[in-house]
Amino acid sequence: MNKRLRSKLGNPSSHKYCISPRNSLYRELRMVKENRVLSQNNLSKLRQSILDENLLELRPILVYEKGGILYIADGQHRYKIAVEEHLDYYIEVHEGEITPETIAKLNTNQRNWTVMDFAHSWATSTGTKKVYSKYLEYYEDHNITHSMLISLFNGGTQRGIGMKEFKEGKLKWNPLIKEYVEDVLYKMKQLEFAAFNPAMNKVTLRRQTFQIGMLTALKTPKFRFNRFIKNLYDVKHRFNKYHRVVDIKQEIFRIESAK
């Protein structure tokens, strides 16, 4: 470890260092950009727990050194609360750098990362930034669930296809995928304004069973999407009432074939 840091930390106790507000390192820990975004909900719950019974000594913050700076690999919520409340906190120093993959696994073991946590993390990493930033852009601009959007990137029609690879930073991206994803998302967006008998609820449009039904129809060679959109304007539909994929698919093809 860096000699300057070693001299400031002093002697470890049970492999932990106590960092008090008087220590010049107290506010010097850095958060890692690949880590998940701080959750205000988690901060609120954890803050109350710490104020009720301070167990920070039993949960040291895991850090590693790089370039004379200590980075937080696990415990950024605890660190933020401790500093804001002027509490002593404890750190455990890992010798050697910790990779973004390890950070994700560490946090997953504490509390499962959401899909958004993984997306934001990989969107800041060299090599995966472009595709995951584009993924986040699509997600924010369209009324589609994470599992279906990830499936769309992988050419699937069922939820969850490619989820494991997505979390590992292996989301695929090339011109053909881009063309396919943007074409499908454009067609899905048209549905928001196509139905008037009755209007399509936003909840319906975001329902995974509805999205599965539509993606399945779009994958069907003989399905005429333009005719479906045209008929949807005039034909009375039951999409807002249906929750099963089989019913939604039947309704899609019924409207598409209407005279």
Image (cartoon, helix red, strand yellow):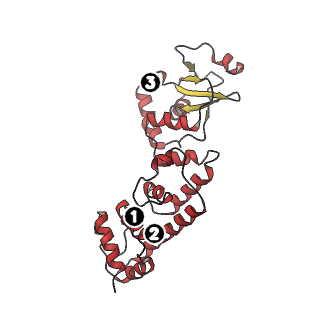
Amino acid beneath label 3: Leu
Query: On the image, numbered disc 1 is attached to which residue?
Result: 211
Give left or right: position of 224 versus 241.
Answer: right
Picture residue at 52% right of the left edge, 44% below the top = 168
Q: Which residue is mark 2?
A: 188
Q: Position of residue 122 (x, y in %)?
A: 57, 46
Residue 55 numbered mark, or none: 3
> Of the residues shown, which amino acid type is indicated by label 2?
Met
Mark 1 is on which residue type? Gln
Which quadrant does the C terminus fall into? bottom left
- Secondary element at tag 2: helix
Rounded to the nearest angstrom, the CA distance separating label 2 from label 1 is 8 Å
Kindly tell me whether residue 197 is visible in this rendering.
Answer: no
Camera-side residue of 155 and 103: 155
At which x and y percent is residue 47? Answer: 46, 34
Kindly check if marks 2 and 3 are in contact, taking CB atoms under 8 A apart as contact: no
First in residue order: circle 1 vs circle 3: 3
Task: Give coordinates of residue 139: x percent, y percent.
Answer: 51, 58
Instruction: Point out the frontmost of discs 1 and 3.
Output: 1
Question: How many residues crowd mark 1 within 10 Å: few (<14), some (14–19), many (20+)?
Answer: many
Residue shown at 45%/63% (left/top)? 143
Residue drawn where x is 38% and y is 63% of the image: 212
Give the CA separation, mark 1 to mark 3.
Answer: 45 Å
Q: Are marks 2 and 1 in contact (CB under 8 Å)?
A: yes
Q: Is residue 175 above or below residue 8?
A: below
Image position of 27 with respect to 163: above or below? above
Q: Is residue 230 visible?
A: yes
